[in-house]
Amino acid sequence: MSDVSTALGVRLYPDLVERGGLAPALIEIAARHQLDVGRVTAPEQGRSRFTCAELHSDQGVVCVGLGSQARYFMVDLRVSGEVQARGDAMDLVQVAQLASAWRAGLTLVELTARFAFMEEMKRRPAPMAQAR
């Protein structure tokens, strides 16, 4: 068994095994559907080079990982390293569409409205200084 098929699991992700991992599959799907997803990267070593991908844009980064017990794609939208929205998609095309929309400048509110699988993370208000 190859490194990629061991890392991904042929049963859940045969299409990703065939393409050499998550990042190459996202690049191919974006090209096929004419979606601009920005620069796509993956870690250089270890199992995660097949199971993780990051799609970079001026808005922030779309981080994608794989479900291990069932087929789904875990998605985080990060701005300056902080997760702003999170969700699980069943279809890799949806992930590419989300990354393309994010890159095109849609806001978090617009993205979570358009992509029902995404949820904006609730942020805690900054502590207020007490008046003396």
Image (tube, rainbow, N blue to C red):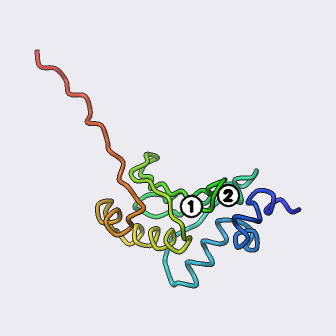
Which residue is label 2 attached to?
51
Relative depth, front residue between 59 and 88: 88
x 66%, y 54%: residue? 69
Label placed on residue 73 = 1
Q: Residue at x 46, y 73 (%)?
A: 97
- Type of residue at label 2? Thr
Looking at the rendered structure, the secondary structure element under dot 2 is: helix
Name the image quarter holding residue 44: bottom right
Residue 85: give x, y in percent of width and height.
40, 53
**Which residue is most to the left?**
132
What residue appears at the point 67 percent right and 58 percent down from the top-left corner? Answer: 51
Between 80 and 124, the residue placed more toward the observer is 124
Mark found first going from the N terminus, 2 or 1 = 2
Q: The residue under label 1 is which amino acid type? A: Phe
- x and y percentages locating residue 91 in the rendered image: 54, 70
Identify the residue at the far right of this view.
1
Q: Is label 2 or label 1 in front?
A: 1
Q: CA distance from mark 2 to mark 1?
A: 10 Å
Q: Quadrant of the C terminus?
A: top left
Q: Secondary structure at mark 1?
A: strand
Q: Quadrant of residue 50?
A: bottom right
Q: Relative to 15, is 4 above or below?
A: above
